[in-house]
Amino acid sequence: MAQQITASLAEFGRGNVAVAGGKGAALGELVRQGFPVPPGFIITTGAYLSFLAETKAGAELDLLLSSEPGDAFDVGASNGGNGTRAAAIRELFASADMPERVREEILAAYAKLGRGAVAVRSSATAEDLPGAAFAGQQDTFLNLTGEDEVVRAVVGCWASLWTERAMAYRRRQGIDRREVAIAVVVQKMVPAAVAGVMFTANPVTGERGEMVVDANPGLGEAVVSGRVTPERYVLDGFGKVLSFVPGGREVVISAAAGGGTREMTGTPGARPGLVAEQLAELAQLGQEAQQHFGRPQDIEWAVAGGVLYVLQVRPITALPPQPPSLNWFQRWVGPFFWEMFQERPYPLDVSGWMRLGILEMLRGMAGSVGVAFPMVEELLPEEDGVVVQLIPPVPCPSLRSLAAPVSLLRRSKEFKAGEWTRDPRFGQFLADTERLNGTDLAPLRWRAVIAFVEECFGTMRAIRDLRISYLPGILLPMLKMRLMLLLLGKMKLAPVLIAGAETRTSQANRALEQLASIAADDPGLSRAFLEADSGQLLDLVEKDPEHGVFRAAFEAFQLEYGHRETTSVVLSSSPTWSDAPEVVLGLVKAMSGGRLQTVDQAGTAMEELNRHPVLRFEPLRRRMLAAVESARAGIAFREDSHFYATKAIPSIRRAYRELGRRLVLAGVIDKPEEIYHLRFEELESITDADDGALPASLRHRFRPLVLARAAKRRELEGIPLLDPALLFAGHLPSGHLPSGGRPARGKQRAGVLVSGTPSSRGQATGQVRVIRAPSEFGQLRSGEILVCPYTNPSWTPLFQRAAAVVVDAGGLASHAAIVAREYGIPAVMGAGSATSTLTDGQWVLVDGTLGVVLPAASSTPTDSH
């Protein structure tokens, strides 16, 4: 099949992406399954490759592509951002004569189809795949008639593989330009009376029990291009309408009698374009497609002559996970876990440091009282090898839990929290950590480095065992202190009193203050800390010999505290303070300029306690103070055992860097840090050769996994692991809407400037920049809110600069909405009057989850996804 120039749709299936492209392979699969797909044929990637090989186009294309620009596209180009190079490629393709053999086979297939009106659609090998929709990045030509028109359209589709917007998109997805090709799908034209897009799950909320249909009279091009605000139906799984919002019908695109398309203004407020029977049929087709492909689908459809056709199907990209239903316990513990998982863990985080380190410690602690702690797969469910969601755990007690009180009491008497650093196990842990830190990994074989990482995880078991022993000792002193405070009528002092515990964290904070003091004594450095950013400060500290005193103190600080995590204890992928010294300098910078006067709340609370008349009786006073000190010792143990547990991270990260370096040499990954896209068990399965080199077969085995998981992570950018609204339901803002709903016009939340369809979740604050035409692209500044009347694919590179997008027209299925969700920036489509209501420089907050734009105070732009 790889040598074929053309073949009917039915000859292809989902396994033929390399030959038929993503769109063609999916359509062929649908034909094989009996879906109502318009008849047609595929011009394979073999035809495209023959065109390049047998004409001047191939060699000249390589010359044009030999140096790709660093920016996403040439924003100053007069052709709407396609750039001068893209224009040259189009001219190159148009001027090259198609090989006669290729032309003849295309025309023979066209003749077999009946030589009538056809739609000619691009089908690149990298599009319509999980994590990379490539929505609108290549061209489509509608209602073509005649052989010459069809051939020109095929060449146009081939050339569209090399527009600057398509190349920028591939660069973002990490797709090598040498690994892409393009097929073309030719089908009988469907002169649609009504058309649009259906999502088999709600693309904004992730609700799998809802289907969302966007529709407009005429061809579906008006919907997918974002030219209209479509009428919107939210359906249940059986096609029953849960909600309906009329569309704007700003334009109706239809097939012209002599070929091509024509446009006319629609009539807004007309009755719905779809009847109940059609919606039920759509829902049934959607359910069948989702079941067949194994994931929610984005389906383009059309109705002509009363017949429903499927024109395209692809996985929904950037789809949030199904919102979980949390019980009271999960809502109670959820904030603790939510705080730790502000960033999405990598596969190596989950399978390594978490499964074998942190969570193994939690499981051991829970098991010591007969409670089963959920497995990591339950806590962090995955799709395509990437974590998509955080599910707060629900521990499961067992019969052994009945004996837990006895076990806890025994351990609390045997192990006193204030004495834990004298435990021989702690001394052994420090010795083991020191030995691991001093191990040279470069000479070791692959298996030995893996064993080194496993040994690092093994050192964590000492902290786990110490916690199992000593944490019960916190309970009784804490209970005793609170009981005594209750009897004294001073319960309110409890949290303040234990805040006075001396911990490694408080010591680190004082050390940072000392660094700030040293910097203040150095006139040049003091001025730099006020004026320079952290990166400039790092360069100054490391290279300027005049600041030797501060540099020595800084190095000593890093030696003592540099193993601390910068983001979360659950992530070995995040740099430590030693890995990111600019983070520490940023902290010092924040402390520069003098310290604010603060109140010693713990000391004040202790003074108040000591003034209690009852504590004049010395025995009671000693007992009370002993209870406070024991409680503080317990708090210090909890904090300090966490501090020491992170001492394993630098050695683990060092080992991963060494393994990553070797995988770069083997061509598996491009940068050592990309190793985090692999799982620990996958690293364990690798065996090097006798000379220590990794086999060439690893590239074929693991590189596709790395690229796919990286694309999936990009797809999920902006989607939180856990929606905080599920944890803090009582704190939602006034006017919060039900899932998936958009504000009804006339019933807007107070203060709303404009509203529309919530199309990409999250919030962003920034200054408005109204862009009405491609000629104004260069006016957009990084971090501004892009406001525009409509979008098409040539606008989407702007999304890399914008903090959020607000569009007068468009709906959930428009290119703008799809790409905004993939880029993880908030988007509001169908806002109607945004370009006339909002003005350049105006500060606004865009809420893509609610579909509203609110006024905001002038401030530093922020975003929250």
Image (tube, rainbow, N blue to C red):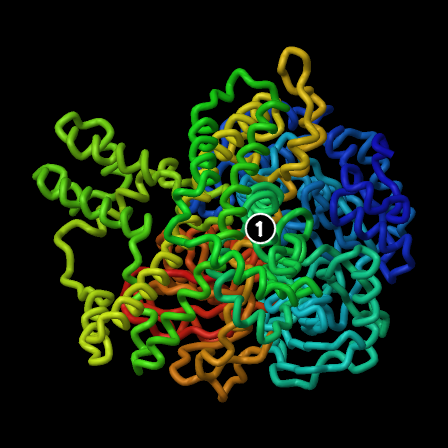
In the rendered image, which quarter is residue 229 located in?
bottom right
What's the residue type where badge 1 is placed? Answer: Leu
The picture places residue 285, in percent across and down from the top left corner, at: 83, 67
Write down the residue under mark 1.
Answer: 359
Looking at the picture, how far across and down is residue 546, in whole percent?
Answer: 13, 28
At x 29%, y 43%, the residue is 584
Q: Secondary structure at mark 1?
A: helix
Q: Foreground residue, 144 or 817?
A: 817
Q: Is residue 720 visible?
A: no
Q: Is residue 712 left or right of residue 805?
A: right
Residue pushed farthest top?
Answer: 691
Is 719 or 156 nearer to us in this picture?
719
Q: Picture coordinates of residue 88 (x, y %)?
A: 54, 35
Q: Measuring 49% from the left and 45% from the top, which residue is drawn there?
A: 463
Above or below, 329 relative to 122: below
Q: Alpha-carbon neighbours of circle 1 within 10 Å: few (<14), some, or many (≥20)?
A: some
Q: Nearer the viewer, residue 495 or 625?
A: 625
Q: Report the front residue among 444 and 794.
A: 444
x and y, in percent, of residue 515 in the image: 19, 42
